[in-house]
Image (cartoon, coloured by chain):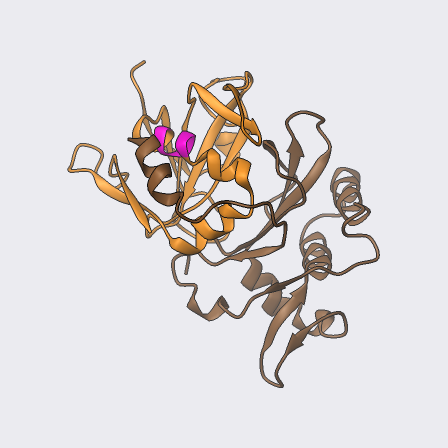
């Protein structure tokens, strides 16, 4: 596993906490070289988020989504391009801070740093970057 | 720093090997059929379709709350492509999960169209890729 220091979603102004990439998840990503390559973009978003949301599931409580826009994104094997317009990269963590998914999300009309329908999908926006 | 991380992880080389995967950290089933960048299209609380960034074609999906679906619809799944013991279903057809997910929500035309699109995908039609759920008991993060 590897860990990345990120803003603590439970205590925004407190010390940073670790986001954890478990070996099972990394192994899964190895089955998809493009996704594996995009781990670089994922780590960038975790370290430079633009929005942080809490409550990512309708039924189960908890979980976090960090969104951001890395400069580059792998679009095909060994092909990197500028990050696609009209999207943000969402990185999802469970309440134990295990990263379990990342994906391109269509941007919202009311805030281009947020995924579409963010008000319905998440329980709250807890942090936004100044820039 | 990100580069260094990938370099460290790169000791075992990635190789395209599409297969359904039960993600115990997210309690979801993920299945992508291609090795390309995709974007997510959320159909409902349970199903998200992955579409090719290049062609917009559906190339995969994610089913959330997999263990809840498995428990609720176990009886309906048992007759189709299930492996396990007398007491525990360990591998279930992904198609069954899709059907169970569809049954959980309102039967609107938009949902029907999205699920039908996935179920008629060449890699799913007439086949039953299966996914292990033996790790289900370990899921506690979302409980």
Q: Position of residue A94 (x, y in %)?
A: 39, 49
Pick the front one: B3 or B29: B3
Count of number-bearing discs: 0
Q: Is residue A15 left or right of residue B39?
A: left
Q: Main secondary structure of the magenta part?
A: helix
Q: Position of residue A80 (x, y in %)?
A: 52, 23
Q: Which chain is brown?
A: B
The residue shown at (72%, 26%) is: B55
Is residue A58 among what the camera can see? Answer: no
**Is A64 drawn above or below residue A47 in the view shown?**
below
Furthest residue toward bottom:
B86
* Chain A, hue in figure: orange
Magenta span:
A40-44
**Is A117 drawn above or below residue B124 in the view shown?**
above
The residue shown at (46%, 33%) is: A90
The residue shown at (50%, 67%) is: B136
Q: Position of residue B91 (x, y in %)?
A: 63, 69
Pick the front one: A45 or A93: A45
Q: Is residue B82 left or right of residue A36?
A: right
Q: Quadrant of the C terminus of chain B?
A: bottom left
The residue shown at (50%, 19%) is: A83
């Amino acid at each position: 596993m590897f860990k990345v220091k990120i803003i603590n979603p439970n205590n925004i102004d407190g010390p940073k906490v670790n986001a954890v990439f478990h070996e099972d998840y990394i192994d899964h990503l190895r089955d998809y070289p493009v996704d594996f390559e995009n781990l670089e973009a994922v780590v960038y978003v975790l370290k430079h988020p633009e929005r942080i949301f809490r409550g990512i599931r309708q039924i189960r409580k908890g979980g976090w989504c960090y969104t951001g826009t890395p400069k580059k994104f792998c679009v095909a094997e060994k092909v990197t391009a500028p990050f696609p317009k009209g999207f943000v990269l969402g990185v999802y963590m469970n309440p134990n801070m295990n990263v379990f998914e990342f994906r391109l999300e269509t941007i919202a009309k009311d805030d281009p740093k947020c995924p579409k329908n963010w008000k319905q999908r998440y329980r709250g926006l807890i942090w936004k970057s100044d820039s | 720093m990100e580069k260094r991380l990938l370099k460290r992880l790169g000791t075992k080389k990635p190789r395209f090997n599409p297969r359904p995967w039960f993600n115990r950290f997210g309690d979801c089933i993920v299945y992508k059929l291609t090795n390309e960048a995709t974007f997510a299209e959320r159909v409902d609380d349970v199903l998200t379709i992955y579409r090719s960034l290049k062609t917009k074609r559906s190339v995969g999906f994610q089913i959330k709350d997999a263990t809840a679906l498995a428990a609720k619809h176990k009886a309906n799944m048992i007759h189709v492509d299930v492996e396990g013991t007398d007491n525990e279903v360990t591998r279930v057809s992904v198609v069954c999960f899709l059907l169970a997910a569809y049954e959980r929500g309102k039967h609107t035309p938009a949902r029907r169209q999205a699920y039908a699109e996935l179920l008629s995908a060449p890699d799913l039609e007439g086949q039953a890729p299966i996914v292990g759920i033996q790790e289900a008991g370990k899921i506690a993060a979302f409980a």
